[in-house]
Image (tube, rainbow, N blue to C red):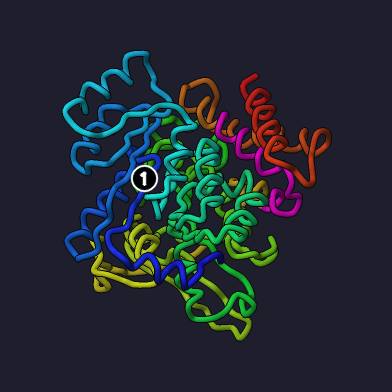
Amino acid sequence: MNVKSSTAAALQHHPRGIAVLGSTGSIGTNTLNVMAHLATQGQPFEVIGLAAASNWQKLAQQALEFKPKVAVLSQPAAATDLSELKKALAHTDIQVLTGDAAVAELARRDDVSVVAASVVGAAGLAPVLAAAEAGKWIALANKEALVVAGCLVMPLAEKYGATILPVDSEHSAIFQSLRSGESREIDRIILTASGGPFRSWPAEKMQTATVDEALNHPNWRMGPKITIDSATLMNKALEIVEAHWLFNLPAESIDVLVHPQSIIHSMIEFVDGSIIAQLGTPDMRTAIQYALTHPQRHQGCSSRLDWTKIKEMTFEQPDGRFPALDIGYEVIRRGGTSGAVANAANETANALFRDGKIKFGKIIEITSSILKKHLANGFVARPQLADLLAADAWARAEAAL
């Protein structure tokens, strides 16, 4: 895990300049919520920049509340969106920028010490690379950056002294549990999964599930892309790959258990048989806050577990109805451009399903088929960034056919 105590100590000076990338999404909104809470605890952050893809109205609201120096609208949905954002912020000193390059530049700024990377999908790769190269403290919610380019991100972070702390609840749980031992003492890690809305559905019924049914997650409130990924368990496949890079573990040391109650967020089994787990309510703010304040803990804003109301904690092995997990293990074993292709194919198929163009059962079928095709012809074992971007573009084109 790429955490340096010197960096942690340096970040105890207040306030800390932060850039929130993907600020209008679920994780970004919760990050701002946590920051507002921490300010009441004497742990202030100075918001240097906010970045969103296309939701200029929510970005304007956030900018007026948190008063950043910069607001970036990277992908305006309409020609008037940027002008509307500028109009909404005209009476402020906030600089309004646009384009993906502006998001990466925000991550590099000298007055930014913490980058909250919560952009969804491969679009978050460029700013994560920029933050790593600039030696920033990265609160990483964008798992796709490691799935696509862990082979580039982690060496850059090591070279330039960047600190990467996980925001995904599962990886935060592993990171927190590691304080009870050392990496070399891990026998395996166990990532828990709720099982999503279709945990008890027969395979035939799942094939034709509707978008509304897939978005009806029983425990977590997330954005639509991630919620669909949770329904297919592709989100867990991506987390398997993320865990591989964060904790330097082989595929054989990463297991998945379905835990419908979502109380245990993940656990480590050490070589002596001891199992250390992190438990809590299914609230992303706990993991976000720890990523921002590590190694310290402060009074949290998440709800607490009521142990008197917990009647059971159950566990199941994921079964053949969820073949997405096999993709995650294959990506670890093959490495190279396989992660870029699997992620891009899934992102495209996920969007096609949400747009009503394919059935639910086709999402993983398409993703797996395109990955197999790539591994047979076009796979690059030791890719540069250009190779990863080319693989990403190829997979998107293939999935869109």
Percent position of residue 151, x then y: 67, 51
Per the image, the residue denoted by label 1 is 20
Residue extent of the magenta highlight: 329-348
Amino acid type assigned to the residue bearing label 1 in the image: Val
Front residue of 320/11: it is 11
Q: Is residue 233 above or below residue 386?
A: below
Observer able to see residue 200: no
Where 276 sits versus 196, above or below? below
Residue visible at 42% across and 70% down in the picture: 278
Main SS category, magenta section: helix
Q: Residue at x 59, y 65 (%)?
A: 247
- What x and y, as percent, mark residue 246? 58, 60
Q: Quadrant of residue 305?
A: bottom left
Looking at the figure, which quarter contains the C terminus?
A: top right
Compare residues 90 and 396 and report the one nearer the observer.
90
Is residue 79 placed above or below 243 in the rendered structure?
above
